[in-house]
């Protein structure tokens, strides 16, 4: 049990930290505390994959496995999580979200402890499968909580600050995992992250408020709609008929909800775009370090210096991507939340391309840094779009569907990258084939840019449809 005195102490510490991190700009210390806690939820999940990415060499030698098997270790949680997301989305729309989130993190930490005790590859893989059953909770619950805790006009910017947790967690996992494994062993790295998980679960239970569903919609009704909605109404945009609800969302079954959200054209495109982006990111976070080590003969010290630079660039991208999209919407660019990520994906691919083709670290690493920033910048506007075009009582289930596709992409990426690297290794300049695998993966990123650009015509009509749906079923 956490004593009242301890809770008060944690509260004072969090208040001080959040105020120093810019609480006033984020909406006060209370809202900043919520941002930090939700960001930590996403950070915990990516810290795990960061740890695995940092200890590839140790796992290969300790368990006598190859790149494909390492890829399966990161793919297993995503694959199982994709299946588990189906009931989690339903639960998110039907029960209190904070206890659901805190409880899943407790189970996640237990799975990490078991993984650290593994004596064989099968044992470790089994623990990763169990891990995946609870990682699915984060997506739907966090999305639903953001929609009810933060004003719609700040939606993309808020998503950017919270998604920064993914990058911070990944960087932390890479640094902590690599250094702990180097000085102690890879098992301790797993246990260290598990301890952080237990601490976060306790903080969520005590400090994260459970908002009323539709709270921000009610507030918008008293004080005016968010900019995109105002522009849609001002322009008399006709709702897309297929996207207008014809049944009360509270009474819809999971199958009915899935069929409805997949009728929304913009939603289908952002699901595909998000899955492609995370597919590339999953391959990157699993094999980027070993690629840099083997391509440029980088040591642990050089990697420890390079990781924070890339992490800071990506963090900057995720923060600015959301703010840029929100700012453009306020200035009258209604489709900014789909065109900004489209441009970011395309530009990211075009920067990765020369970086992968050159053998000079001084040229490649700055290009990789800028490309990572743009890749990260695409996600906050995409996540904001989903809340714009779906009835608030379907947010959890809509996010669950998106998470299923995203996690399947994340599950496939490490295995596919590992298999392709082995297949293409013959004749490769690096001897690993990873450079060629990454080059092939740039094609879907360019496709993302085209898909999102074409969606700018459907997005306003889908926003109008969401407004009409909420008038029918408040």
Image (cartoon, rainbow, N blue to C red):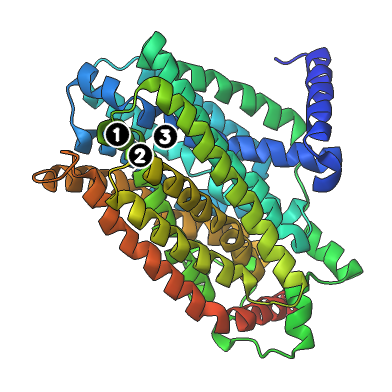
Q: Which of pointers 1 and 2 lies earlier in the amino acid sequence?
A: 1
Q: Position of residue 8 (x, y in %)?
A: 84, 20
- Residue hosting label 1: 296
Q: What is the distance, in whole Å, between disc 2 and disc 3 at their CAs?
A: 25 Å
Within the image, what quadrant is residue 61 found in? top left
Q: Position of residue 314 (x, y in %)?
A: 54, 45
Q: Residues within 10 Å of mark 1 (few under 14, many from 20)?
A: few
Q: Which numbered dot is residue 49?
A: 3
Report helix, strand or loop for mark 3. Answer: helix
* Residue depicted at x 34% and y 55%: 354
Q: Residues within 10 Å of mark 2 (few under 14, many from 20)?
A: some
| Front residue (pair 474, 428) | 428
Q: Which of pointers 2 and 3 lies earlier in the amino acid sequence?
A: 3
| Front residue (pair 348, 172) | 348
Q: Which numbered dot is residue 225?
A: none
- Residue hosting label 2: 361
* Residue depicted at x 73% and y 74%: 228
Q: Is residue 415 visible?
A: yes
Please report contact status of discs 1 and 2: CB closer than 8 Å, yes or no. yes
Does residue 412 appear to the left or right of 32 in the view shown?
left
Which quarter of the image is occupied by the N terminus? top right
Q: Position of residue 341 (x, y in %)?
A: 54, 64
Does residue 400 appear to the left or right of 355 in the view shown?
right
Which quarter of the image is occupied by the C terminus? bottom right
Q: What is the distance, in whole Å, between disc 3 and disc 1 at their CAs?
A: 23 Å
Within the image, what quadrant is residue 197 found in? top right
Of labels 3 and 1, the one closer to you:
1
Does residue 418 appear to the left or right of 137 in the view shown?
left
Q: Residues within 10 Å of mark 3 (few under 14, many from 20)?
A: many
Q: What is the distance, in whole Å, between disc 1 and disc 2 at their CAs?
A: 6 Å
Instruction: Please determine whether, in this image, residue 187 is positioned above or below residue 336.
Output: above
């Amino acid at each position: 049990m956490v004593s009242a005195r301890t809770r008060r102490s944690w509260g004072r510490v969090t208040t001080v930290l959040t105020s120093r991190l810019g609480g006033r700009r984020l909406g006060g210390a209370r809202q900043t505390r919520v941002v930090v806690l939700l960001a930590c939820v996403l950070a915990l999940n990516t810290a795990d994959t960061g740890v695995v990415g940092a200890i590839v060499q140790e796992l290969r030698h300790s368990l006598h496995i190859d790149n494909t098997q390492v890829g399966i270790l990161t793919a297993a949680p995503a694959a199982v999580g994709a299946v588990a997301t189906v009931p989690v989305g339903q639960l998110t729309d039907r029960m209190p979200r904070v206890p659901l989130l805190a409880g899943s993190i407790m189970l996640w930490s237990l799975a990490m402890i078991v993984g650290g005790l593994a004596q064989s590859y099968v044992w470790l893989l089994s623990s990763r499968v169990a891990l995946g059953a609870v990682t699915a909770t984060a997506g739907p619950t966090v999305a639903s909580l953001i929609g009810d805790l933060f004003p719609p006009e700040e939606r993309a910017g808020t998503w950017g600050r919270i998604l920064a947790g993914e990058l911070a967690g990944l960087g932390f996992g890479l640094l902590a995992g690599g250094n702990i494994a180097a000085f102690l062993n890879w098992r301790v790295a797993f246990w260290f992250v598990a301890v952080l998980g237990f601490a976060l679960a306790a903080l969520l239970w005590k400090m994260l408020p459970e908002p009323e569903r539709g709270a921000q919609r009610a507030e918008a009704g008293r004080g005016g709609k968010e900019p995109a909605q105002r522009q849609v109404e001002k322009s008399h945009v006709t709702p897309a008929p297929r996207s207008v609800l014809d049944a009360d969302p509270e009474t819809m079954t999971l199958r009915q909800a899935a069929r409805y959200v997949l009728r929304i054209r913009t939603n289908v495109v952002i699901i595909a775009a998000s899955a492609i982006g995370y597919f590339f990111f999953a391959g990157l976070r699993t094999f980027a370090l070993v690629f840099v080590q083997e391509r440029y003969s980088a040591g642990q010290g050089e990697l420890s210096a390079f990781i924070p630079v890339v992490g800071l660039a990506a963090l900057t991208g995720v923060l600015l991507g959301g703010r840029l999209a929100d700012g453009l919407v306020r200035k009258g660019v209604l489709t900014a939340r789909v065109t900004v990520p489209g441009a970011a994906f395309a530009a990211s691919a075009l920067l990765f391309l020369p970086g992968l083709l050159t053998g000079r670290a001084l040229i490649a690493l700055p290009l990789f840094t800028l490309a990572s920033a743009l890749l990260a910048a695409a996600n906050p506007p995409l996540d904001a779009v989903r809340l714009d075009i779906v009835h608030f009582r379907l947010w959890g289930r809509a996010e669950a569907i998106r998470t299923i596709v995203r996690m399947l992409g994340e599950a496939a990426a490490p295995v596919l990258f590992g298999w392709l690297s082995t297949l293409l290794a013959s004749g490769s300049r690096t001897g690993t084939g990873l450079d060629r695998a990454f080059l092939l993966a740039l094609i879907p990123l360019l496709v993302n840019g085209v898909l999102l650009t074409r969606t700018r015509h459907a997005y306003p009509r889908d926003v109008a449809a969401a407004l009409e749906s909420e008038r029918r079923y408040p």
